[in-house]
Image (cartoon, rainbow, N blue to C red):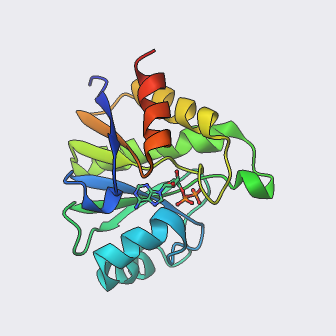
Amino acid sequence: MTQPEIRAVQGDITTIEVDAIVNAANNAMRGGGGVDGAIHRAGGPAILADCIDRFPDGLATGDAGWTTAGDLPAKWVIHTVGPNHAAGQTDRSLLTSCYRRSLEVADELGAESVAFPLISAGIYGWPKDDAIRAGLETVAAADTQVDTVLFVAFDAATHQQIEYQLNR
Ligand code: ADP
């Protein structure tokens, strides 16, 4: 196994053509705000139906699991639950676990390309600089068969911050 190539991309993760996109979900896994809402809206009801079927009890914080991607260009959605910093969950190992577990699930699926949003950096309030660092360092150190990992930022400022840290 080798380390994946990492690239920063600006845009809407629901439009990215990769094998798997990662969703910053919550423990209930029944949809939500932010990127979670965008993925369920764009992918259609098949994603929620699969979440209910395959994850009757939802997911633990730091864990990951896959569903169909419904109408999205990706083949799978890998759902992961980041720590809610705004609610006092500040254990960084939970955040790095999200990236590690998502890549393990990608390996189970045989996904070669994976796109991540910046987990916990939105509604869950993880300080953005450290959220970027945690994601980049964890993926860079991962032992995975995934060959390409995209970090997708919605806005230009976040995208530039990711590019800056990636090229240091
Ligand atoms: P969390 O609850 O884990 O903080 P959010 O969805 O609130 O998750 O935010 C995670 C990150 O995803 C934020 O940086 C947010 O700007 C970004 N984001 C929101 N919608 C999209 C989208 N459609 N594509 C890519 N990134 C998005």
| Residue 75 percent location from the top left of the image | 20, 61
Q: Quadrant of residue 147?
A: top left
89 relative position to 13: left or right? right
Instruction: Name above or below for residue 48 compared with residue 153.
Output: below
Q: Is residue 159 left or right of residue 108?
A: right
Q: Is residue 56 visible?
A: yes
Residue occupying the point 37% across, 42% down = 103
From the top left corner, tell me how far across and down residue 125 is, in percent. 68, 52
Which residue is at the far right?
88
Q: For this rendering, which residue is in front, 103 or 124?
A: 124
**Residue at image x 20%, y 42%?**
112
Outermost residue toward the front? Answer: 156
* Above-or-below relation of 87 to 45: above
Quarter of the rendering occupied by the N terminus: top left
| Residue 94 rendering spot, x and y as whole percentages | 63, 44
Name of the residue lying farthest toward the top = 168
Residue drawn at the location 47% of the way across and 55% of the way down: 64
The residue drawn where x is 42% and y is 24% is: 166
Residue 20 horizontal side relative to residue 157, left or right = left
Count of numbered circles in the view: 0
Quick check: can you spot residue 100?
no
Percent coordinates x, y for residue 109 in the rendering: 25, 52
